[in-house]
């Protein structure tokens, strides 16, 4: 992982030293060096910067003020302060700086702070990957459900469901390309809560249907394959909203 960095300091010698340290660190890329916070702020609007090595006492806008400006936005850029004044440490903590390098500092101290930034970026990246994987899992889960059938859980693809019918204490799930329906000891209401509402609709106290399996319909019934299913009175308004796009 390479971190895109800038150095900001109004002292030329200090700016040169930090820039040199960045350039000799394998996981850092020096994207720019600036003698003032205002100039740096303009650069931050034009490129993606992961890390700023930022002086505090500067003439135009000090480092704490710049950090506060960045903190008001959706900031992913992290800050390591580089300053000769230890009295700003508390302010640095308040703006969530990663570290606080007190001048004069050597390369070992610089590297330790930079490694902290690298570790932080790695945690962010790991978190983003985990979130992405979770989202992928959730999307996959949206395409099937598990039903308890006798003494086992059976995976049912939502794409295979023709309709679901309530039979007292059981529900019957009629599947396409299958000569045998699946019976599960559950209620229609419990099953309804597990199904994505964009794909399935309850049209009767005893029936749930997948909208994409409807082959024909009237205001009072739908036909799925060879089965005609009546629309219950309490479901007619919701069905009418759906059917209104076609009838």
Image: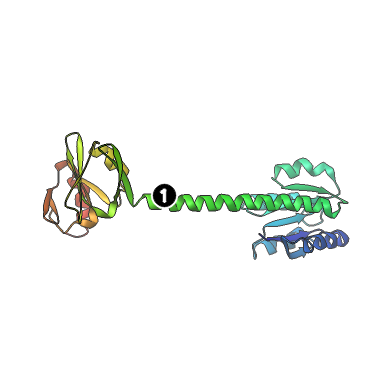
Q: Nearer the viewer, residue 178 or 64?
A: 178
Q: Nearer the viewer, residue 197 or 150?
A: 150
Q: Position of residue 106 (x, y in %)?
A: 86, 53
Q: Residues within 10 Å of mark 1 (few under 14, many from 20)?
A: few
Q: Position of residue 246 (x, y in %)?
A: 19, 60
Q: Residue furthest front?
A: 151
Q: Quadrant of the N terminus?
A: bottom right
In the image, residue 225 sits, relative to residue 171, either above or below, namely: below
Query: Which residue is drawn at the image coordinates 73% and 42% (left, top)?
Result: 93
- Mark 1 falls on what kind of element? helix
In the image, residue 64 sits, relative to residue 46, either above or below, namely: above
Residue 205: in sight, yes or no?
Answer: no
List the residue tagged with mark 1.
138
Q: Position of residue 99 (x, y in %)?
A: 75, 47
Q: Position of residue 153 (x, y in %)?
A: 31, 41
Query: Which residue is drawn at the image coordinates 30% and 39% (left, top)?
Result: 152
* The quarter of the displayed image where residue 7 is located: bottom right
Q: Quadrant of the C terminus?
A: bottom left
Horizontal placement of 65 versus 15: left or right? left
């Amino acid at each position: 992982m390479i971190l895109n960095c800038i150095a900001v300091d109004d002292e030329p010698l200090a700016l040169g030293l930090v820039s040199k340290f960045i350039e000799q660190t394998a996981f850092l890329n020096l994207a720019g060096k600036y003698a003032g916070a205002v100039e740096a702020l303009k650069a931050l609007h034009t490129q993606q910067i992961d890390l700023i090595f930022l002086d505090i006492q500067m003439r135009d806008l000090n480092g704490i003020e710049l950090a506060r400006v960045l903190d008001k936005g959706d900031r992913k850029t992290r800050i390591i302060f580089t300053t000769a004044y230890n009295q700003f440490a508390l302010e640095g903590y308040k703006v969530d700086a990663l570290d606080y390098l007190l001048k004069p500092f050597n390369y070992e101290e610089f590297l330790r702070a930079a490694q902290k930034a690298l570790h932080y970026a790695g945690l962010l990246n790991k978190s983003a990957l985990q979130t992405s994987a979770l989202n992928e899992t959730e999307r996959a889960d949206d395409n099937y459900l598990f039903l308890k059938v006798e003494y086992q859980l059976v995976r049912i693809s939502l794409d295979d469901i023709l309709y679901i019918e309530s039979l007292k204490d059981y529900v019957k799930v009629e599947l396409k390309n299958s000569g045998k329906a699946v019976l599960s000891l559950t209620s229609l209401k419990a099953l309804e809560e597990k199904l994505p509402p964009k794909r399935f609709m309850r049209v009767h106290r005893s029936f749930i249907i997948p909208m994409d399996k409807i082959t024909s319909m009237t205001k009072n019934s739908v036909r799925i394959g060879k089965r005609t299913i009546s629309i219950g009175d309490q479901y007619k308004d919701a069905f009418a909203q759906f059917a209104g796009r076609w009838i």
